[in-house]
Image (cartoon, rainbow, N blue to C red):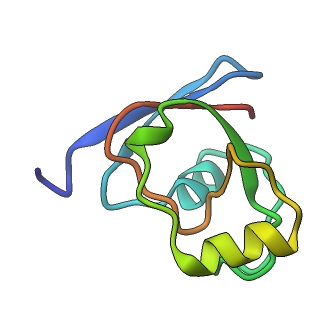
Amino acid sequence: MSLFKSFKLHLKKSGETLNISKARNILDVLIEEGIEIDYACQNVFCGRCAVTVLEGADNLELISALEEDVKIKCNLGENQRLTCKLRMKGDVTIEL
């Protein structure tokens, strides 16, 4: 699959849909598009960029050991993922 293939990221609260390349992480695109999201380190350490995945969790990269550690440390739920390093491999809907 080409790194330039794009997928749809649906933002449930705002109703917006963004096209995101497989090569891009979700947080960078949200920032570029002016979508308000809490973040700090942009490097999986702080947990502030977490979002709840409503649909398409199977279309996201597998969770890394580091992300899993941060999720535990920050008391994040099973359906929450960190957008700073998260790449898509299919369409996804998030609560944002």
Q: Is residue 86 above or below residue 77?
A: below
Q: Is residue 20 above or below residue 44?
A: above
Q: Name the one closer to the observer, 58 or 86.
A: 58
Q: Name the one closer to the observer, 35 or 1.
A: 1
Q: Quadrant of residue 94?
A: top right
Residue sticking out furthest to the left: 1
Q: Quadrant of residue 14?
A: top right
| x, y percent for residue 75 | 88, 62
Left or right: where 13 falls relative to 4: right
| x, y percent for residue 11 | 64, 28
Q: Name the one closer to the observer, 4 or 70.
A: 70
Left or right: where 16 falls relative to 46: left
| x, y percent for residue 19 | 40, 36
Q: Is residue 5 above or below residue 3?
A: above
> Image point 75% across, 34% down: which residue?
96
> Image point 65% across, 70% down: which residue?
68
Q: Is residue 68 above or below residue 37?
A: below
Q: Quadrant of residue 52?
A: top right
Residue sticking out furthest to the top: 15
Left or right: where 31 falls relative to 19: right
> Image point 32% across, 46% down: which residue?
89
> Image point 68% across, 43% down: which residue?
79
